[in-house]
Each structure stands twice: as C-alpha cells, then as structure tokens.
Amino acid sequence: MIILKGKETALTIREELRVEIDSLKSEHGRAPGLAVILVGQDPASEVYVRNKKIACEKSGIISYAHHIDGGVAQQELEDLIKKLNADDKVDGILLQLPLPKGLDSQRCLELIDPGKDVDGFHPMNVGKLMLGLPGFRSCTPAGIMTLLERYNLPTSGKKAVVVGRSNIVGKPLAMMLMQYGDFANATVTVCHSRTANLAEEVKSADFVFAAIGIPKFITKDMVKQGAVVVDVGINRTDDGLVGDCDYAALEDVASAMTPVPGGVGPMTIAQLLINTVQAFREHNA
Ligand code: NDP
C-alpha cells in the first residue's frame, strides 16, 4: 500500500512556494500577506492557527495575527474584516472557525472581500466552484486534489464516494472531483447520515473520501480491494488523534491511503499558502 504522505508533500510545496515568493518579492517589493483572525480560546483552533502561522513564515508569507477576545461584539469583528479588506498589505483573510456562540460566522464570511477569501468560503467563490469558473477553492478539498495529483492518482472515469456533505469538506470535494481540470472527472456519489446502504455505496468506490468526524467509521469490510482511501477525519480520542478510517485494518485492502495525522491536515495548510500566493498575483496583475 502506498502511504499518501501529506506532510512530506506539503513540505515540498512550501519549498517550491518559498522560491516563488522570493522572486515575487524582488519583482513587487513586498511579500504576500495573510491576515488570520482567531476569536476566543478554542484549543484546537489555536493549534491550527499556530501551524498556519509557522507555515506562512517558513514559506515567506507575512502573517498578520489578530487574536481577539471571545467576548468581542459582532460589529467590532465586522469592522476588523472591513479594515483588512481595505489593507493593501493583506492579500488573504482567514477567519478561523468555529466562532464563539453569539457571533454570526456566515455574516462575517460574506463580508470578506471575495478576492481575499483564501479559504474559499465566500458564496461568490463557492458559486464559482459550482460553475467551474476560476476562484478560490476551499483548502481541505483542494489540498486533497493536489495530493492526488502529486501522487499521480487521477480520478477521471473512476467511481468516487464522498462520505460527509459539509460545506467545508464534503460538498466542495464532490464538486472538485467532478470537475477539477482533466485530473478529476470522477463519477461522484455523496453519502451522509441518511444514506441507505452506505456500506454498499462505499464498497463500490475506486476512491473513498471519509469526512464524517467519527473515529474508525470506515471499516475493512466496507472498502473494495485496491481502492484509494483519503481520510479527512481528525478525532481526538484517548489514543490520540485518529481518523475516520480504521487505518490498520485497511492497510490490507487499500492500494493507497492517507495517514492521520500527517495526511490531509498538512495539505490543507499547503493549499492555504497556494491560495494566498494566487491572491497576491491577482492583486498585482
Ligand atoms: P461535519 O460535522 O460538518 O459533517 C459531517 C458529515 O458526516 C455530515 O455530512 C454528516 O451527515 C456525516 N455523518 C455524520 N454521521 C454519519 C453517519 N453515521 N453516517 C454517514 N454520514 C454521517 O464535519 P466536517 O465536514 O467539518 O469534518 C469532518 C471531519 O473532518 C471531522 O473529523 C473534522 O475534524 C475533519 N476535518 C479535517 C480537516 C483537515 O484539515 N484535515 C478540515 C476540516 C475538517 P449529515 O449531513 O446527514 O448530518
């Protein structure tokens, strides 16, 4: 079985970007800038934000951290987003979710300038994805597509089953598998909590994508021999971080699989860097 090493691939991408950013800096007199807004003290979000900051620094992107109190008023948060929209040094804006209770995240996401929406969550970018137009692609699914591409695992003509239909993973991933350049063109099935015969659906897949949030949900008997398995899940358990797939058992059946940790997670961050450089290029075009 091939281990799809997201961590290694992400490091390679970061190095490639560092060289690209160096030359962009000498051409334009400044480096790309990413503003990251973290509201409150969610421990998992703090870890994600720290990792994003480190990745930015190592690639040459300047990160502007805005860590604000969980008790912030909606208006104050909106004012910050507007300020960042108008700031020429800021090419990308990332609002770390979830927001503390009482704050309207959808309203905030819709306030972000679509040209700085490097997370790809603004309805404008989601709509562009749906229409197959260029725009910012949300980082986790786009990072998965990049990983498959780097391992030369085209999904074209294959049957892909995505388990999970969230707005940040399942739905955009299904769209990308359908039409992400020549590399995609899969026949896609999306499963969720109301799917009848989920095990049968998954068993028919050449590519399985698990984005559920339940540890070891995808078991050996659900996966076809030779299938490629991409595990998006990050579940904190007494045994540490585990994915949505029973990794040890699947080693016998999958032809390739992402580990957790070290698979999709680092690719999400790599894609954020790619999107920020894309935003910089568009602002300087
Ligand atoms: P959500 O909770 O938003 O969505 C979970 C999806 O799984 C829903 O569509 C839900 O169906 C479906 N589901 C839940 N229970 C079942 C079940 N018993 N049978 C079938 N489907 C089920 O999660 P996210 O998409 O945000 O995240 C999924 C996982 O991926 C989490 O572990 C999360 O931590 C991880 N994640 C990892 C990232 C990374 O960078 N690696 C980034 C983002 C998320 P329904 O819609 O019917 O309720």
Image (tube, rainbow, N blue to C red):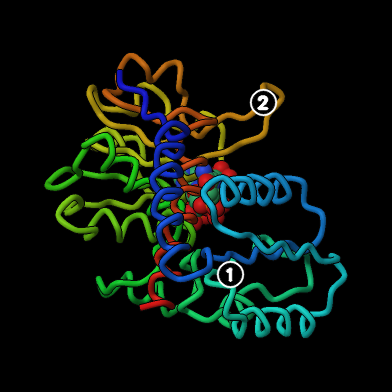
Q: Compared with residue 278, is residue 42 higher up or lower down, i.e. above or below? A: above
| Residue drawn at the location 52% of the way across and 71% of the way down | 91
Marks 1/2 in contact by CB < 8 Å: the verdict is: no
Kind of residue sitting beneath label 2? Gly
Q: Which mark is residue 245?
A: none
Q: Quadrant of the N terminus?
A: top left
Against 274, residue 242 (above or below) is: above
Q: Residue at x 56, y 38 (%)?
A: 214
Query: Where is residue 265 drawn, in percent x and y?
Result: 51, 41
169 or 192: nearer the viewer = 169
Circle 1: residue type: Ile
Q: Give the CA distance from mark 1 to mark 2.
A: 31 Å
Percent of width and height locating residue 142? 38, 54
* Left or right: 246 in relation to 252: right
Q: Which residue is mark 2?
A: 240
For the residue pair 231 and 22, the one nearer the viewer reads as 22
**Residue 152 appears left or right of 34:** left
Secondary structure of residue under mark 2 = strand
Q: Nearer the viewer, mark 1 or mark 2?
A: 1
* Residue 216 in the image: above or below residue 106: above
Above-or-below relation of 284 to 152: below
Q: Position of residue 11 (x, y in %)?
A: 46, 37
Q: Which residue in the structure is indicated by mark 1?
A: 93
